[in-house]
Image: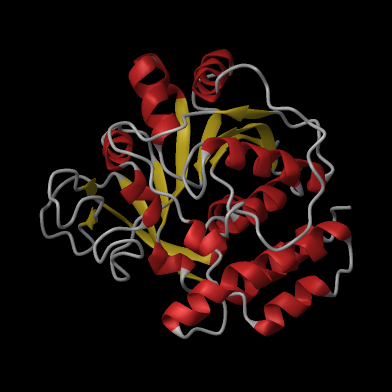
Amino acid sequence: MSRKIIIDTDPGQDDAVAILLALASPEELDVLGIVTVAGNVELNQTTRNALQTVELSGRTDVPVYAGCARPMRQPLITAKYVHGDTGLDGPDLPAPQMKAEEQHGVDFIIEALRSNPANTVTLCTLGPLTNIGMAFVKAPDIVERVERIVMMGGAYFEVGNTTPAAEFNIYVDPEAADLVMRSGVPITLATLDVTHKVLTTKDHLEQIRAIGKRAATATVEMLDFFERFDREKYGWDGGPLHDPCVIAWLLKPELFGGRDINVEIETGSELTRGMTVADYWGIMDKPANVHFLDSVDATGFFALLAQRLERLP
C-alpha cells in the first residue's frame, strides 16, 4: 500500500527533482497535494515552478496549493543567488496550463490531516517550515495526527550554508522550525551532513542524460545550472541534491544512515539565529526528537533517481 504524503516546497531545482522522484513512484507514494511556500524565490514564483514541475512529470492529477508568502516573524530571504531569478533557471519550460487550487495551502494541510485516518499522512518538507508551523498553530488538533515529518534542513558537522551557523531552510523561518521541532511529531531530518554527500558529478548526470526523455533532460538542464554555485563555492565535483534525499529516504531508507538525537533551533541569538543545535553526542541527555541522517550510499541514490526518472514522459 502506498504511503500518503504532502510535499511542502519552495522550488528550487533540487525541490523540482524531489517532486519528480515522488511523482514517478506512485506504488510507494500517494501524493495528496503539493503546497508551496516562499523561500528560494517568492511565493508566486515557487507556485509557478511547482505547477511546471507537475506538468513536466505528466502527473497533472496532483493538485498544487499556494501557502504562506512570508516567514512567521521576519522578512523573506531568498536564494536567487543559487537558483537564479526564477528558481528553476536552466531548462526552458513552457508556461503552466494548470492553475493552483483556490484553497490556501495551510488550510489544505489541516483538512488533509483531519480527513485521513490519524497517523497515515507524512509531511515532506523541502523548504522553510512556515506552512507547517502555521498549520500547527491554527489547528493544534492535527499535530498528533501526523505520521511523520521528513525534512530537509539544518546541519551539525557542516554547520551552515547561509550564515556560518545556519542552513537556509531553517534560517528563513527559525520560529516555524523551532515550533515544529518541539511539536512531538516523529521527524526524520536530512541535513547538509548527508545532502553534501550526494553530488551531481559528471558521471551521475550522464546517467540521467542518457535516458533521453523530456523530464530527464530537463532535470539535467536544471542541475547543470544549479551545480555551478556549489562548484564555485566549495570546489566540489558537482552540486548537492538536498531535497531529493527526503523522497529517497521514504523510498529506500536503507540507502541512509543516521542516529536518534535531540535537536533544537536557536531563535534568539543574532550571531547564531537559525542554527540547528544538534546534540549529536548526547551531551545534554535530552530525549531524542529527530532521526538525524548523516550518511548515504550516493551510487545507490543516483541509481534510484535514474530508474524513476526513466518512468516519466
Which of the 4 quarters of the picture holds residue 248?
bottom right
Residue 188 vertical position relative to residue 133 in the rendered view, above or below: below
In this view of the protein, which residue sits in the foreground, 89 or 207? 89
Query: What colouring method underlies this structural image?
Result: secondary structure
**Left or right of residue 47: residue 271:** left
Q: Residue at x 37, y 16 (%)?
A: 138
**Left or right of residue 104: residue 153:** left
Q: Residue at x 78, y 61 (%)?
A: 218
In the rendered image, the quadrant that contains the N terminus is: top right
Q: Residue at x 43, y 78 (%)?
A: 233
Q: Position of residue 231 (x, y in %)?
A: 51, 80
**Left or right of residue 233: residue 63:** right
Total numbered labels placed on residues in the image: 0
Q: Position of residue 111 (x, y in %)?
A: 55, 15
Residue 294 visible (yes or no): no
Q: Residue at x 19, y 64 (%)?
A: 281
In this view of the protein, which residue sits in the foreground, 163 or 254? 163
Residue 30 vertical position relative to residue 85 in the rendered view, above or below: above
Q: Position of residue 194 (x, y in %)?
A: 44, 67
The residue lying furthest to the front in this view is 85
Residue 312 visible (yes or no): yes
Residue 55 vertical position relative to residue 259 in the rendered view, above or below: above
**Left or right of residue 74: residue 302:** right
Q: Position of residue 5 (x, y in %)?
A: 60, 35
Residue 163 vertical position relative to residue 179 in the rendered view, above or below: below
